[in-house]
Each structure stands twice: as structure tokens, then as C-alpha cells.
Amino acid sequence: MITDSYGRTINYLRLAVTDRCNLRCTYCMPKDGLDWLPRRELMTYEEMWRICNLLVKMGVEKIRITGGEPFVRKDLLPFLKNISTINGLQQLTLTTNGVLTAPFIPELKKIGIKTVNLSLDTLDRDRFIKITHRDELNKIMETLESLLHHDFEVKINAVVMEGLNTEDIIPLVELTKALPVAVRFIEEMPFNGGSHLTALHWDAQRILEYMKAHFPGIQKRPDAAHSTSYNYHIPGHKGEVGIIAAYSRSFCGSCNRLRITPTGIVRTCLYDKGKLNIKEALREGKDDEALQDMIAQTILKKAANGREAERTRDKHEPAQESMATIGG
Ligand code: SAM
Ligand code: SF4
């Protein structure tokens, strides 16, 4: 079991397998994309496999594969199959934009993945194009349908942005009437790779008040341990709604996460800059014990919360790198 200096158990890894993406969500990256990382800088599947094994031995129970868009990386499925066989791993899951995902769904089911987070900020085609700069909403809706058909637990992530998708809040909540999905509204964070300056118009409180005005019967649901979302239910609806205060950072006290970026930077908080390059340590030939020790030491430096983590950054490096290079 790995614990940090505040006694928090770290048992959840979010592993970003690529920075590349087939969408250009405005809250995540500029419309012309990023300067994609050269391939040699990405961790290989073999390197990621070794690190995942080491971390599970250290107490990690859940691994989320993310990116960039995970399905943009070639041969993702064999990698997922390998990860799913790690002895001691209790849950493998992934976050995807759904564009390329549908054909893989039966296989994902076979290897034991039960929950998938799907990013979907709007149900309107024109707004989708405005937000993502691509015309792919149909494919995402097909992915959603297929995930539900295959009995996956689906969480829909929607970043709320003034002037872009606030008209979608109610239609997205209404999705939970007929569908057993959890729709989670996320506060916009500044990690957009310089796409724009973020001003938080819709914080968790405002999103909640807005939902309450339309659904006065909305009820609070208990939140699972380590949950980043505050969860609610509307009587008569099959699904749930949630709010993730990602910018306000009100959930840091129970944080159990560790992130590894596509280049192998170990980040103990979204808002810090990363304290260890595990890929370099691997490539220098460090043995398992040395790698585990380096990871444990890094976890001990995990900041108490996201505000403190942000203060450890260099003044000239504001928190605005793309989520695709961190792993959302
Ligand atoms: N491409 C995949 C996807 O979009 O689901 C996985 C990677 S994406 C970086 C993971 C999550 O981060 C998505 O749900 C996305 O909505 C969220 N995200 C990206 N940039 C964000 C930002 N600036 N603020 C809040 N959430 C953000
Ligand atoms: Fe791509 Fe996901 Fe970022 Fe959108 S949020 S640009 S889908 S990585």
C-alpha cells in the first residue's frame, strides 16, 4: 500500500497512452492541435506494462487508460488485454471521446472492462462542431448506444462552457431519464494548451442551482469514497447526474490518484508540473526496486491540495498545458 505524507492511500493510476487526438475540443487544445510529441518520447507499451505491474505490486487497484484519445494509438487493444491480466488489478477502465471506440466494444467487454467514461459536451451537431472543430457527433452517439447495449456502466463527461454549451445542461440531464448513465458536469480548467484564457463562469454551485431551477425535486445521492463528483438523482430517472468541481478543487482531501503522462512524467496532482520522469529511469536501466523507491519518494511529495501544487510551479509556467499531454 502506498501512502503520501498526508496519509492518503494512492491506489488509482491514470495512464495517458498518447497526446494525439482526433478532436480539437476548445477547452483542451488549440484548433490547429498541439505540437505532437515525437514518437520516441512516448513510453512504449512494454515500458507502460512494466510500470503498471510495479504499481499494482505497490498497491494500485484501479487503472484508467486515457490520453489524448487512447484509440488513436495503434494496437491499443492488445495492450489493454495485457493490462487486464495483471495479478491484483481490480479495475481497468478508460476515458474516450467515442469517435473510434464502437468497433472495439465487444472486445472491451471480453477483457473485463465494465465502466467507460465518454466525453460528450453537447447533443447538438452545430455546437459539437463549434466545440470540437470536427463533425463526429454521430459516431459518439453510436458508441454510447453500443456501450449501453453491451451493459457497460457509462459516465458521460461534459465540460460546461459559457457561450458554448450551457443550452445542453438540461438536455444532457434529460438523457438520464431514459438511459442508465451518469452525466457529470465538469468545471472548465485552464489546461487547454493555450487555446484561450479560461474564466470560470460556471462553477459547481452555479451548475447545481441551474439544475435545481429546472428539476426542483433533484435529490443528493451519497458520494462514493474518493469520488470527485457530487452526485444527484432526479426522481423517476434511470440515471444520475454529477458535478465535478475540477477548478474549485474541493475534493483534494480524499485524492487517491497518480497520473503518468505519455512521456512518462509521474504527476501526483493535475496542477503540479510532475516530479519524476519514470521513462528515463527505465531507459537508464534502473531495476524494479529502484523504480518502486523513486515512485514512493515522489508520492511522498504529493501536495496537500491543487492550490498548493499550483504554487510549486515556476512563475513563468502557468497551469495551461493541454489536458491531452497530462492525461485527463
Ligand atoms: N480524449 C479522451 C476524452 O476526451 O474522453 C480522453 C482524454 S481527455 C483529456 C479526458 C477528459 O478530460 C475529458 O472528459 C475532457 O472533457 C476532460 N478535459 C479536457 N480538458 C479539460 C479542461 N480544460 N477542463 C476540464 N476538463 C477537461
Ligand atoms: Fe481530444 Fe479528449 Fe482533449 Fe477533446 S478532451 S481534444 S477528445 S484529448
Image (cartoon, rainbow, N blue to C red):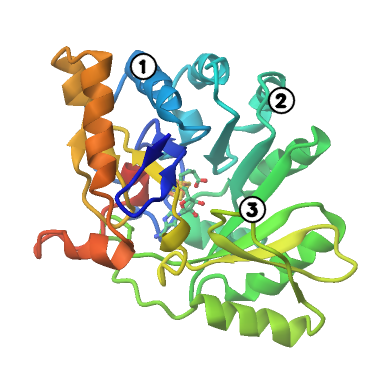
Can the viewer see residue 99? yes
- The residue tagged with tag 2: helix, strand or loop? helix
Looking at the picture, how far across and down is residue 128, in whole percent? Answer: 57, 58
Residue at the spot of label 2: 109
Please tell me which of labels 2 and 3 falls first in the chain.
Answer: 2
Residue at the spot of label 1: 50
- Front position among marks 2 and 1: 1
47 relative to 173 in the view: left or right: left
Can the viewer see residue 38? no
The mark found on residue 3 in the picture is none
Comparing 111 with 68, the one in front is 111
Q: On the rendered image, what quadrant is the N terminus found in?
A: top left
Residue at the spot of label 3: 156
Q: Residue at x 49, y 21 (%)?
A: 76
Q: Which amino acid does label 1 sit on?
A: Arg
Q: Where is 279 relative to 251, above or below?
A: above
- The residue tagged with tag 3: helix, strand or loop? strand
Circles 2 and 1 in contact, beta carbons < 8 Å: no
Please tell me which of labels 2 and 1 falls first in the chain.
Answer: 1
Please tell me which of labels 3 and 1 falls first in the chain.
Answer: 1
Q: Label 2 neighbourhood size at 10 Å, few (<14), some (14-19), many (20+)?
A: some
Marks 2 and 3 sit apart, C-alpha to C-alpha, by: 18 Å
236 relative to 168 in the view: left or right: right
Q: Which residue is drawn at 71% across and 25% down?
A: 109
Q: Label 1 neighbourhood size at 10 Å, few (<14), some (14-19), many (20+)?
A: some
Looking at the picture, how far across and down is residue 71, in whole percent? Answer: 50, 30
Q: Which amino acid does label 3 sit on?
A: Ile
Give the quarter of the image for residue 248: bottom left
- The residue tagged with tag 1: helix, strand or loop? helix
Q: Which amino acid does label 2 sit on?
A: Lys
Q: Where is 294 relative to 145, above or below?
A: above
